[in-house]
Image: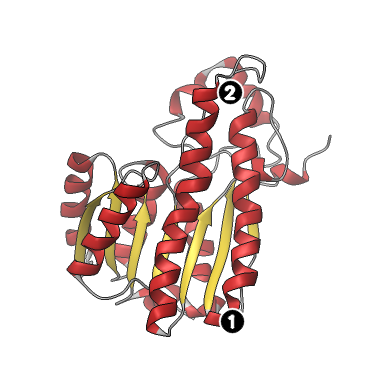
């Protein structure tokens, strides 16, 4: 079964596509021949990525500015998506931020920013897509990008851990509620992945120590999430909904 071929011709929205995992997922979809909608706040980076995706084989690339922390921005982005082509088939809910520090010192502003982006933003994007699918009488697939920190916690990133636990439960709740409409909702729970946002951290002593706690003794690569994304996004996973699957080099299985 060629999972990539099953994505060909589908319209795929990737949020947070200007860097990191989102950029990787956009490249994956384009390489499979999907019509890709890339969304983020940094339009200049999206424009550069759009040029690349066209060369990778995507039959259609749509650039949309979207700040998932703003409901108005999400509404404007979906209006642009609706105007520029067919209904979406797949939503990759990837946009997210983090904050570090002791819980006793985290500001309310920082806490709210993480929750607004990681939880409320993901919910509002999913809601916009699901409403359109229900109105059209057809299904669709939503893939939320959660984290292994939605299952277990790490010191000094409490707001982020809380937000990803919320994404895990949101995935299951929406999957249950929307299954009758043919809308599938699943989540990938990445472990520690090497991206441009975190590269500097892994050169520190603390970062190197964290890597040694991963049973496979290495960081993951963004492309190592691709197989699971294709399963969740395509009809290969047609009976799969409410699943939250870790890809973490065995980290969740590590000894306490």
Q: Which mark is residue 129?
A: none
Horizontal side of residue 208 vs 221, given as left or right: right
Indicate the secondary structure of the residue bearing disc 1.
Answer: helix
According to the picture, the residue beneath numbered tag 1 turns out to be: 180
Indicate the secondary structure of the residue bearing disc 2.
Answer: helix
Alpha-carbon span between mark 1 and mark 2: 44 Å
The percent coordinates of residue 251 (x first, y second) are 70, 42
According to the picture, the residue beneath numbered tag 2 turns out to be: 207
Horizontal side of residue 89 vs 225, given as left or right: left
Residue 191 visible here: no
Q: Residues within 10 Å of mark 1 (few under 14, many from 20)?
A: few
- Above or below, 212 against 173 in this view is above
Quarter of the image with the C terminus in it: top right
Counting residues from the start of the chain, the first of labels 1 and 2 encountered is 1
User: Residue at 29% of width from left, 60% of height from top?
Assistant: 78
The percent coordinates of residue 247 (x first, y second) are 61, 52
- Above or below, 123 against 212 in this view is below
The percent coordinates of residue 153 (x first, y second) are 71, 35
Nearer the observer, 196 or 98: 98
The single residue placed furthest to the right in the displayed view is 256
């Amino acid at each position: 079964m060629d999972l990539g071929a099953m994505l060909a011709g589908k319209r795929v929205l990737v949020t947070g596509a200007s860097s990191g995992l989102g950029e990787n997922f956009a490249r994956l979809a384009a390489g499979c021949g999907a019509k890709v909608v890339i969304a983020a706040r940094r339009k200049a980076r999206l424009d550069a990525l759009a040029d690349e995706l066209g060369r990778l084989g995507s039959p259609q690339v749509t650039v949309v500015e979207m700040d998932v922390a703003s409901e108005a921005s999400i509404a404007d982005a979906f209006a642009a998506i609706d105007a520029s082509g067919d209904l979406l088939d797949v939503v990759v809910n990837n946009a997210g931020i983090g904050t570090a520090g002791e819980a006793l010192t985290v500001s309310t502003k920082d806490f709210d920013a993480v929750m607004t982006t990681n939880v409320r933003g993901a919910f509002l994007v999913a809601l916009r897509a699901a409403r359109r699918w229900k109105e059209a009488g057809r299904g669709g697939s939503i893939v939320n990008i959660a984290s292994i920190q939605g299952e277990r916690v790490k010191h000094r990133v409490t707001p982020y851990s809380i937000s990803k636990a919320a994404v895990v439960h949101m995935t299951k709740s929406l999957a249950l509620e929307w299954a009758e409409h043919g809308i599938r909702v699943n989540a990938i729970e990445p472990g520690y992945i090497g991206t441009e946002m975190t590269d500097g951290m892994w050169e520190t002593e603390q970062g190197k120590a964290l890597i040694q706690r991963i049973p496979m003794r290495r960081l993951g690569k963004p492309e190592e999430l691709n197989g699971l994304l294709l399963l969740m996004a395509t009809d290969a996973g047609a009976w799969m909904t409410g699943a939250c699957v870790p890809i973490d080099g065995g980290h969740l299985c590590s000894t306490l």
